[in-house]
Amino acid sequence: MPNMKLNTLYTSLLMMVLLMGCSAENSQKPEPAVESTEKQAVATPDSSLRILFLGDSITAGFGLGEDLAFPALLQAQITESGYSAKVSNAGISGDTSTGGLARTDWLLQSKVDILVLELGGNDGLRGIDLSLTRSNLRGIVEKTQMAWPDVRIIMVGMIIPPNLGHEYTRDFSAMYPELATSLGTGFFPFTPENLEGILDNMQPDGIHPTEEGHRIIAATLWKTLEPVVQDLS
């Protein structure tokens, strides 16, 4: 990818995460998103797989609504492919790894067969000590593995722009595959290559993906998720 395009990507990601942080207090009714997660979890039949998406405003479908976010698109793909699985969306705009860890015990009250963990971007853009982010992500994974020993976890790797310095940026990006390896989880690299096409499909705010942007995310993530769903089905 040309440097100019990569710089544009980093700038867009920076704007996106900064807005996530600002929207933590002003996000559109985050409570209903959590309530819907509870309803989905309770309604999940024992015979069906439960796939929990724990993330921030991208997972939550900020500006579009949960029904148009990539987890909902993956639910449609799962159903179309003939698998018996139910997606639960636990995305909240502005969430950090600390917030995700605080919600984990509650979310684990219902069965979790697959956890897709998409958190930490807000931590990185705020310059939070990586030891705290690492500890929080590890805590989420270990709590999930303890509650549901047969769970499969896909950790979504994050990138941040280099404005906080080369060393911090490098260590932040490296943290995700290192954690995935040490904790025995799957890994989905949220790299510029995987984001190809997202910058051309943004909402008018220039920050959050449109429906088409979410379709790109869903299609890319499905390549990692489907083998796991197939193996557990």
Image (cartoon, rainbow, N blue to C red):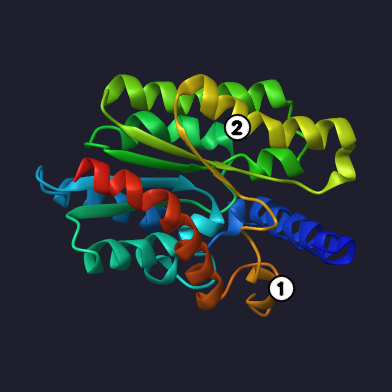
Q: Measured from the top left, where is residue 4 in percent x and y? A: 89, 65
Is residue 35 among the parts visible in the rendering? no
Q: Looking at this view, is 97 or 209 the one in front?
A: 209
Q: Measured from the top left, where is residue 141 in percent x and y? A: 44, 27
Q: Residue at x 77, y 62 (%)?
A: 9
10 Å neighbourhood of mark 2: few (<14), some, or many (≥20)?
Answer: some
Upstream in sequence: badge 1 or badge 2: 2
Give amino acid for label 1: Gly
| Number of dots carrying numbers | 2
Q: From the viewer's perspective, is residue 102 above or below residue 6?
A: above
Q: Measured from the top left, where is residue 202 in percent x and y? A: 64, 75
Mark drawn on residue 177: 2
Q: From the viewer's perspective, is residue 5 above or below residue 205?
A: above
- Secondary element type, mark 2: helix
Task: Name the image quarter holding residue 20.
Answer: bottom right
Q: Residue at x 82, y 32 (%)?
A: 168
Q: Residue at x 18, y 62 (%)?
A: 82
Is residue 232 among the parts visible in the rendering? yes
10 Å neighbourhood of mark 1: few (<14), some, or many (≥20)?
Answer: some
Mark drawn on residue 206: 1
Q: Residue at x 33, y 37 (%)?
A: 107
Give amino acid for label 2: Pro
Q: Looking at this view, is 193 or 48 the one in front?
A: 193
Q: Looking at this view, is 38 or 192 the one in front?
A: 192
View extreme (bottom): residue? 204
- Secondary element type, mark 1: loop
Q: Measured from the top left, where is residue 153 in percent x and y? A: 40, 35
- Could you tell whether 76 is left or right of 126 in the image? left
Mark drawn on residue 20: none
